[in-house]
Amino acid sequence: MAEEKQHYMTEEGKQKLEEEYEHLKTERRQEVVERIKIARSFGDLSENSEYDAAKDEQAFVEGRISQIEKMLKNAVIIEEDTSNNSEVALGKSVTFKEIPDGEEEVYTIVGSAEADPIEGKISNDSPMAQSLLGRKVGDSVTVNTPGGEFDVEILEVN
């Protein structure tokens, strides 16, 4: 049997996943079951779009429950390491600017389970994070992305 992927996450990220899991299992699952019951009462299931939509939603909910179970089972909590604030690591925020004259950007490197670029959280599996991990304040780094490559300078690590 293949070894399952570890899912790195902060304690806060794990808590959010646990809350989503409970919501899906206790509330959302029951809502979908009720929608299926109502749709069945409309008659012929072969031409019943409400039934089809409810069954699709049920498949989505059950798939998400299964996905979260695996993520929580294989969760690795990112411990905050305040001893070395000069090296980019998982769980830390990094401030950098594009060379030569880009604006400063700040991202926190988290596990893929809680990545949200809009909130400034990037996955440790992303090209950006892969280029920055292990680097130090003052380093110039070439970042290879699907959109091309660019250079950044690391200004601060927290």
Image: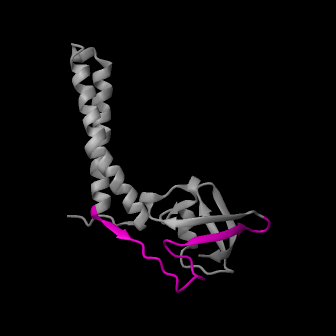
- Location of residue 133 in the rendering, given as x and y in whole percent from the top left corner: 54, 74
25 w.r.t. 93: above or below: above
> What colour scheme was applied to this rendering of the protein?
one colour
- Location of residue 117 in the rendering, given as x and y in whole percent from the top left corner: 56, 55
Residue 124 sits inside the magenta stretch: no
Q: Quadrant of the N terminus?
A: bottom left
Q: Nearer the viewer, residue 29 or 114?
A: 29
Residue sitting farthest toward the bottom: 83
- Location of residue 81 in the rendering, given as x and y in whole percent from the top left corner: 48, 81
Q: Residue at x 26, y 45 (%)?
A: 25
Q: Quadrant of residue 42?
A: top left
What main secondary structure does the magenta stretch of the protein show? loop
Start-end of magenta stretch: 73-101
59 w.r.t. 23: above or below: above
- Location of residue 157 in the rendering, given as x and y in whole percent from the top left corner: 61, 76
Q: Quadrant of residue 152?
A: bottom right
Q: Quadrant of the C terminus?
A: bottom right
Q: Residue at x 30, y 61 (%)?
A: 72
46 w.r.t. 55: above or below: above
69 left or right of 133? Answer: left
Residue 99 sits inside the magenta stretch: yes
Q: Residue at x 59, y 79 (%)?
A: 135
